[in-house]
Image (spheres, rainbow, N blue to C red):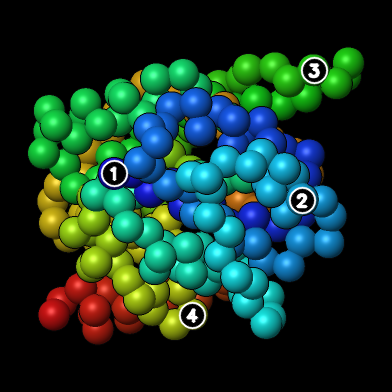
Amino acid sequence: MISVCMATYNGEAFVREQLLSILSQLSAEDEVLIADDGSTDATLEIIQSLKDPRIQIIPPSPRRLGPVYNLERVLSRAQGKWIFLADQDDVWLPGKVSKVLAEFEKTAADCILHDAFFYRKNQEGTWECGNRIFEIRPPHHGIFSNVKKNSYTGCCMAFRRNLLDKALPFPQSLPMHDQWIGLCAEKTKKARFLREPLIKYRIHLHNATDLANGKRASLGQKILWRWSLVRILLSRLGR
């Protein structure tokens, strides 16, 4: 059984196409778990309009949690043997699920990180394919190497249930969920990189993380994030 986990917030422009690209690759026994973080647009109405029994919308939190801890709510409900992370604004390419599952079987990995194509709108408003995430962020192994420079992008990740059990609950003040899950995978030494692009990563003004356009946190924020991760590593992964 596969659990696809998605956190949404004001994603009405994208979420329908993304969900259709996901659902077309799942079996009747699989599940798509969604936690919305207080959308003020039609995101929830669009999701509900699909009327697909595989979609489960988690009851809302009384307050906004942000993308990291909203996703934690989804992950804590996942029942599948394999967990796939999905952003609301991407598109899964045909064959993504079967190729990732084949890589799990071939490598006995706990976590698969695959490549993705960047997509941007041109002046005519049409989405155009650009370069790849792995060209901008070449993946690499090692715990402290990934504290220094993160390889892991959540929407390109899938992992086994045993890794989810290690990653949850998320530590307090976690800066990035994907980096944390990736570090847990690096601890097991069973993370593998699949160098085939399997999603369209759409670049737009409201991306929670902008990998392509060079928007970066301040130096002070980077230092605080890394110190937080080191502290968490020492307290959690060393046990």
Q: Give the residue number, with chain letter if any, for mark 4.
A: 173
- SS state under label 2: helix
Q: Give the residue number, with chain letter if any, for mark 1.
A: 1
Mark 4 or 1, nearer chain start = 1
Q: Give the residue number, with chain letter if any, for mark 3.
A: 126
Residue 1 higher or lower than 25, as above or below? below
Report how far apart the C-alphas of labels 2 and 4 lie in the structure. Answer: 31 Å
Identity, as a three-letter code, of the amino acid under mark 3: Thr
Report how far apart the C-alphas of labels 2 and 1 lie in the structure. Answer: 27 Å
Mark 2 or 4, nearer chain start = 2
- SS state under label 3: loop
From the viewer's perspective, tell me whether residue 180 is left or right of residue 186.
right
| Of the pair 1 and 219, the residue shown nearer to us | 1
In terms of image quadrants, where is residue 193? top left
Report how far apart the C-alphas of labels 3 and 2 lie in the structure. Answer: 25 Å
Q: Residues within 10 Å of mark 2 (few under 14, many from 20)?
A: few
Q: Residue at x 29, y 44 (%)?
A: 1
Q: Identify the image quadrant of the C terminus.
A: bottom left
Viewer-nearest of discs 4 and 1: 1
